[in-house]
Image (tube, rainbow, N blue to C red):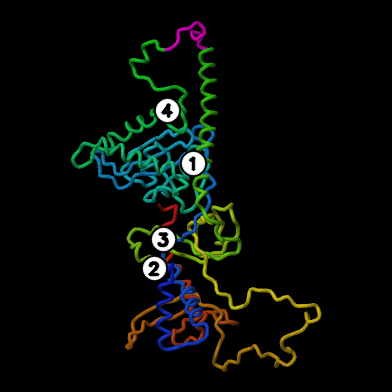
Amino acid sequence: MRLVIPETLYQDILHHYHRIRDHFHWRGLYKSVQRYVGECVDCETGNSKPRIQGESPGNLQATYPFQIIAMDHIPSLPRSHKGNTELLIFEDLFSGYVIAKASSSRTAQTVAESYEDASSDEAIRNQDLCPIFFRAFNKILGQRQRATMAYRPQANGSAERMVQTTTRAIKMCVQDLDQRDWDEYAERITFAINTAHDRIRGETPFYMVHGWDPRSTLEAVIPVGSTRRHDRDPRRWRYRIQRYYQQVREQVNQRLREAISDRADLHNQEIRPHQLEVGSRVWLYLDRVKEGYAKKLAHLGHGPFRIVEKVGEHAVKLEIAGSEYHIFPMVHVNKLKLVKEYPDRPLMRLNVSDSIQDRLDFDKDLLPGGSWIQDRDPDEYEVEKITDMRSGRRTRYGRIYREFLVHWRGYEDPTWVDEAGLNCGALLREFLRDRTNHNRFGVMQSHEES
């Protein structure tokens, strides 16, 4: 006998199935329970993360120094003797050159002052780092920001790994009992990292940026190198150094191209094809919540959204126009989960011969005119939509008194109506569901706020 572990949602389906079977029975009972559990929005948005794995197109490749710069930070460090608590990490993706800067906070104004920004815009005060500081930083350098895949930290993998390398190096150097001397070693450690030989590039990051290796004060005053006659001419010496530097850059480009391609091929070998197509409805999984909220109690699935475009096999574009979701539409497929759909109509097309193609299943002439119009009492009005809700005290029976702002069909002015006075269950349920989804999405932290 072998123990079989049920897959996702099987436990819920079997639980409801056995409870209903004890008292009721009808044909297709299990399918009905399966559909009931699968269509539960709270169950779908509150379950585990998606299992789709998309192919890797390969990381971004820079072709010259400081073409693409990755940034990350090491937060929540012990307050140093200089008052610093954050360490900003900038890395050049072509050369691997690292710049580290200790800071007292990661607000936009503080970081801008660290880099001697002359502007003092009031709008960037008391704001988080990324969205506002990067706009000012790009404006200073005259460059544009390339957005990484939304909610995909692997797209910034070089900076993520450099954070780990810097953290381990600082840990080896810290000597203070309270760990308050870390900023004294941070910038020195970056020099050691920049002068270390890179296995992938074949050269040191320092050489790839400057064109020469660093020398000490003693080496600068002592003649080192060849003293041949053609090396004594400064112009010939510069030409030879520049030619060698161009050859090294070409070799580094080739090495990076091969390393990125090999890494992508290794990742794609274990990837199974997914079923995400244009027009599919999906849940978007966001795994970061704002400060003050518990991630264990948050619903991490949001939507559903419809796919309007596929970007290769690794990303899709979601339809967010007209919705209340303000997110970056390009999303990696491993953040998506297909919506379980149970269509009421058959999906199989019948092959009907030409002789009976025009036959109808019923005679529409026998139907009474206007049979689809629902009769209403004189004091009944049709609800067009519900746009707002307000709640107040509890009633004597424990029910929370709720009123809804109702727009009536054929009338301009909306009115507040008690919940007990409404007879539009579908519209009321749709409004409450949209309101719940909006509140749950407000708990999440966007990629620009991190």
Determine the secondary structure under disc 3.
loop
Q: Amino acid at mark 1?
A: Asn
Q: Which residue is mark 3?
A: 444
Residue 216 location, quadrant? top left
Q: Residue at x 45, y 7 (%)?
A: 227
Q: Residues within 10 Å of mark 3 (few under 14, many from 20)?
A: many
Q: Which residues are magenta?
A: 225-235
Checking the image for residue 41, the label placed there is none
Residue drawn 73% across and 75% down?
351
| Distance from Cα at disc 1 to Cα at disc 2 | 60 Å
Q: Which residue carries the number 2 mark?
A: 2
Question: Circle 1 — which element?
Answer: helix
- What's the mark number on residue 206? 4
Given the image, on which type of amino acid does mark 4 rest?
Answer: Phe
**C-alpha span from label 2 to label 3:** 42 Å
Q: For the point 53% across and 79% down, which residue is it?
A: 407
Label whose residue precedes the other's in the sequence (2 or 3): 2
Quarter of the rendering containing residue 222: top left
Q: For numbered disc 2, what is the local secondary structure?
A: loop
Residue lying furthest front in this view?
1
Q: Earlier in the sequence, mark 2 or mark 4?
A: 2
Foreground tag (4 vs 1): 4
Q: Is residue 145 visible?
A: no
Q: Does the magenta run of residues contain 232? A: yes
